[in-house]
Amino acid sequence: MRAFIAFELPSDIKSYLSTIINTMSSKIRDVKWVSTDGLHITMKFLGEIEEAKIDIIKNSLTHLENRYAPFKLILSEIDAFPNKKRPRVIVVNLKNGVDIVRNIFQDIENNLENIGFEKETRSFKPHITLGRMRTSMPILEKMIPILEEKTFIVEGLTLFKSTLTNKGAIYDPLWKIKLGGIKNEG
């Protein structure tokens, strides 16, 4: 099964981002937009894994629940990877608790490497994917709505099963690790 580890977003943030996607979809063509239910912050894409690995992965990461407390993130701005001139992915950048997200990412990378997963070779930039460009065309500032700097709390990690369908991916949570450790700065 295809799987990934992510931070879930609160429903009010998903709803808000859905309105942003609706606004952008009328201005930017040929984009496969993420559904409201599919909005999240990916921490580690695992690819195809065997069902037997589900508990092994969770056991290697359960220490995170005591190491990190829930923390705040703020929606920052709409951006694109690799850039707005040649975008492949339209994203929302984050601010405030980004250092905590990077620390958790490194913890995940180090612990999953111990059980046979390769470390990510690309640099990690915490973001929320809004859509993937089917054909590359520059994104002009006038196409991008102003993003409210909405604050939300990250409370835990989820392992999702990803099922690809012709109507888009369906994400089913398989397990969750609730953050409950000492208070983080930020």
Image (cartoon, rainbow, N blue to C red):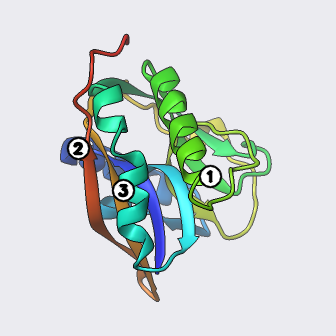
Residue 155 rendering spot, x and y as whole percentages: 25, 36
Q: Could you tell which of marks 2 and 1 lies nearer the N-terminus? A: 2
Task: Identify the amino acid type marked 3.
Answer: Lys
In the image, what residue type sits under mark 2? Pro
Instruction: Say if 167 sits above or below 18 in the image.
Output: below
Q: Residues within 10 Å of mark 2 (few under 14, many from 20)?
A: some
Residue at the location (43% across, 59% down)?
Answer: 57
Residue 58 got which mark?
3
Q: Say above or below: 101 vs 19.
A: above
x%, y% of residue 152? 27, 30
**Depth order, front residue of 184/87:** 184
Label 1: few (<14), some or many (≥20) within 10 Å? some
Quadrant of residue 149 in the image? top left
Q: Nearer the viewer, mark 3 or mark 2?
A: 3
Residue at image point 41% right, 63% down: 56
Instruction: Find out whether the residues at labels 3 and 2 contact each other: C-beta distance under 8 Å.
Output: no
The secondary element bearing badge 3 is classed as helix
- Tell me which residue sits at (29%, 36%) in the image: 65
Mark 1 and 3 residues: CB-CB less than 8 Å, in contact? no
Left-right relation of 15 to 45: left
Tell me the mark number nearer the camera, choosing from 2 and 1.
1
Label disc, if present, on residue 10 of the rendered structure: 2
- Going from N to C along the chain, the mark reached first, 1 or 3, is 3
Please tell me which residue lies in front, 115 or 92.
115
- The image position of residue 47, as x and y in percent, is 57, 71
Return the residue nearer the eye: 116 or 92. Answer: 116
From this view, report whether residue 7 is shown above or below residue 67.
Answer: below
The secondary structure type at the circle numbered 1 is helix
**Label 1 belongs to which residue?**
113
